[in-house]
Amino acid sequence: MKQAFSILELIFAIAIMSIIGTIALPKLMNTKSTATASTIEHDITTIRSAVQSYCTTNNSIQKITDAVNINPSIWDITDTKITYKDHNQECVTMELVDDLLQININPTNGKVCQKIYDLGIRNDTVELFE
């Protein structure tokens, strides 16, 4: 009766796990950045709609935080600006400037930023009071 694995069996098992890891790990990392980009895309749409609705209802907006309640663990939020950073580099900024909401995307600041750009999100200026 055999009680242990032979060295040859162990070498083959390690080789197979290494090959699987080499293929699976990049796919897993790509999936995470794609999911984050999709979440950010949804948040951008939500923020834009919330600010437009608030302005339509109240005929003014002083602070973006009056109109938007967004996840602070993902976004940096101030009174007039909301920012998403990928590895501490500004990727998406949405800022109130006069009667405009300016949306800026910088696709060169990380993998998630590039994926957001690839999803079709572009720089935009939204007139809040027409």
Image (tube, grey):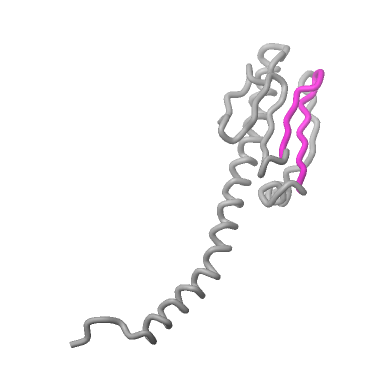
Question: Is 125 left or right of 111, judged from the image as shown?
Answer: right
Residue 49 screen position, x and y as percent: 66, 28
* Foreground of the two, 73 or 48: 73
Q: Which residues are magenta?
A: 91-107
Question: Is 36 left or right of 106, judged from the image as shown?
Answer: left
Please, is residue 13 above or below residue 56 in the view?
Answer: below
Asked if one can make out residue 130 in the rendered structure from this viewpoint, the answer is no
* Foreground of the two, 128 or 3: 3
Q: Quadrant of residue 83?
A: top right
Please, is residue 58 above or below residue 104 in the view?
Answer: above
Q: Quadrant of residue 98?
A: top right
Please, is residue 98 above or below residue 84 in the view?
Answer: above
Residue 109 screen position, x and y as percent: 74, 46
Q: Quadrant of residue 80?
A: top right
Image quadrant containing the C terminus = top right
Q: Residue at x 76, y 40 (%)?
A: 105
Residue 102 screen position, x and y as percent: 78, 29
